Image (cartoon, grey):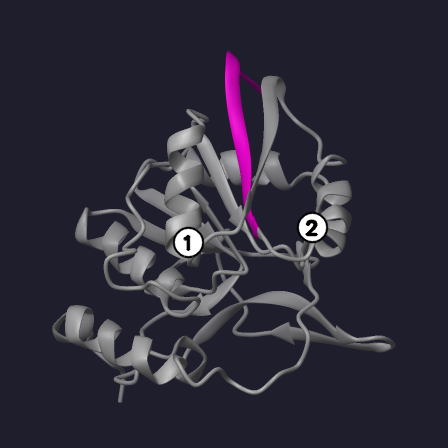
Amino acid sequence: MEVPPGTRIAFITCVNRPELYGEALLYMKQLRLPRGMSAEFVPVEGAASMCSGYNQAMKETSAAYKVYVHQDTLIVNKNFVFDLLALFSDKSIGAVGMIGARKLPASGVWWDAMRTCGRVLHACEPECVVETTCMELEGTWTDVEAADGLLLATAVDVPWREDLFDGWHFYDISMCKELQRRGRKVAVPRQESFWCIHCPKEKPLDVSYKLYQRRFLREYGSELAPEI
């Protein structure tokens, strides 16, 4: 695969634990790139929220493709960029995520959906690795209403809604809805082997989660069509 000379892909990460980002960066730098493409790595430190950090980085880079990825996510599929470009050859796709929901439930919480799809390897604690595998896909990708923010890659620039989501929750589901408002699809690919390892630390759900859930439902609730 070749791309026009000068094509760039940016890997954007909000960072508050440099040791985690350092390991994630090692994996990103090992990814294979098509001839004519270069990669740049954009860490954002001291962000007030995920949305504000991502908007800041979006303005700092003119890369055609942007991968918004958590500092605790390791991209282990070395052909990730090739696979991503193959998906984005379908111009209806605005974003690609690793795992998500075909249809959001009335709660707006994607993992409560009747049909979830995708796969991610979770390494929450040492010697404790769990593979999350959802519904098998028939084609190379499926259209989802929401994808998890551990990794969201975009082919178009849409502002992250920092006016509503000034914290660390629902920013990702909001972006999916903003893309859909603009006529773009969000895709989860078929993964014969998992593309990413997510290494979050187990912790109680933040008390602000419900606040951002209510904000999400006020903004997008009328656009949801839950499966029953």
Position of residue 11 measured from the top left corner of the image (x, y, whole percent): 56, 39
- Mark 1 touching mark 2, by CB under 8 A? no
Q: How many marks?
A: 2
Position of residue 178 measured from the top left corner of the image (x, y, whole percent): 24, 54
User: Magenta: predominant secondary structure element?
Assistant: strand
Q: Secondary structure at mark 2?
A: helix
- As drawn, is 166 to the left or to the right of 10? left
What amino acid does circle 2 point to?
Tyr
Q: Which residue is mark 2?
A: 21
Q: Secondary structure at mark 1?
A: strand
> Between 33 and 91, which is closer to the camera in this rendering?
33
Position of residue 214 measured from the top left corner of the image (x, y, whole percent): 25, 80
Q: Which residue is mark 1?
A: 187
* Pointer 1 local density, CA inside 10 Å: few below 14, some 14–19, many at least 20: many
Marks 1, 2: nearer the viewer: 2
In the orientation shown, which residue stands out farthest toward the left? 222
- Relative to 135, residue 76 above or below: above
- As drawn, is 91 to the left or to the right of 218? right
Chain part drawn in magenta: 1-14
- Relative to 71, residue 108 above or below: below
At 54% from the left and 69% from the top, the residue drawn is: 136
Q: Quadrant of the C terminus?
A: bottom left
At 37% from the left and 43% from the top, the residue drawn is: 55
Q: Is residue 30 magenta?
A: no
Q: Is residue 20 visible?
A: yes
Q: Is residue 4 magenta?
A: yes
